[in-house]
Image (cartoon, rainbow, N blue to C red):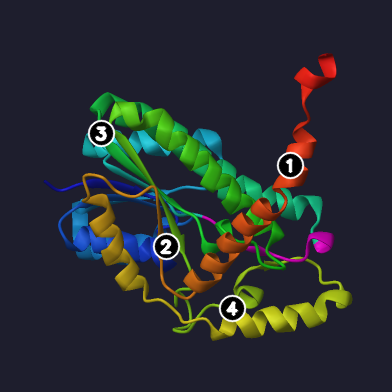
Amino acid sequence: MSKVWFVTGSSRGLGRNFVEAALSRGDKVAATARSTASLDELVAAYGEAVLPLELEVTRKSAVFETVKRAREHFGRLDVIVNNAGYAQVGAVEELTEQDLRDQLETNLFGAVWVIQAALPYLREQGAGHIIQLSSAAGLVAMPLSGAYSASKWALEALNESLSHEVAGFGVKVTVIEPGGFATRSGKNPDPLNNGYLAEPNPIYDGLRRRIAAFVGKQPAGDPAAAAQALLKIVDLENPPLRVLFGQGFYPMLQQAYAERLKTWADWQDLSAQAHGDLDQESR
């Protein structure tokens, strides 16, 4: 049976590849973008199988209306892909209040509005799959990614909580954590060029150069391969809550989590001291 998808951020990058992969196998897609003109090629190629919808995910009322329209058009919604987002780049000291608020409005609140708009329909069906695009930066925070990582770490927690809340209704949740993918220039994207940059403080220029050099060495993933992997995820009876897309950051994640566990273990005595013993004090 073909599936009906609702995908945010469908104009380019991984979102565009997800839409094309779903359509190419006979599924139907409500594809959203800030401008539907970017979706004209999809409509020409797939006709009524794709419903182009203009959407700015930060506008809550627009999100609810757009999800409703998609559901009314296709009669159901099976796969909800929260893909819309961007990367705010800058040291924590460099971020303005507006930088941080804008990052959270799009990456976090935009995703929440989509989830809240779609869930009543998925519950009514007794089935559905929410796909949340996070990032390797949602698992480890690199320098200059404080705002972006904060938004993605929040999404990780939100969707983990959500997965427990909706499992009893037959709704599945999967958080996709991509590494670097060649979504723009055919090579591994450089967040210092592709992201939104905070006003730079020269004191961090050296750090910017080191981070750019590190990111540039990470192997770029193929967006089309990621899309095929996502098709496998949405067809699983018991999909994972979290899954990495790409291999470049896996060794770093292994090291980061091992160090985190070791630190907690090394400081268990202090943890016990911080807990105290109220029973003893009351005696």
Residue identifier under label 4: 190
96 with respect to 242 (left or right):
right
Whichever of callouts 2 and 1 sits on the residue coming sooner in the sequence is 2
Q: Secondary structure at mark 2?
A: strand
Are discs 4 and 3 less than 8 Å apart at CB?
no
Residue identifier under label 3: 127
Q: Amino acid at mark 1?
A: Ser
Q: Which residues fall within the magenta stretch?
A: 85-94
Whichever of callouts 1 and 3 sits on the residue coming sooner in the sequence is 3
Gap between marks 4 and 3 measured at Cα: 38 Å
Residue identifier under label 1: 271
* Viewer-side label of 3, 2: 2
| Relative to 206, residue 81 above or below | above
Q: Position of residue 253 (x, y in %)?
A: 53, 66
Write the residue at 54% across / 36% down.
60
* Viewer-side label of 1, 3: 1
* Viewer-side label of 1, 4: 1
Residue identifier under label 2: 244
Q: Secondary structure at mark 4?
A: loop
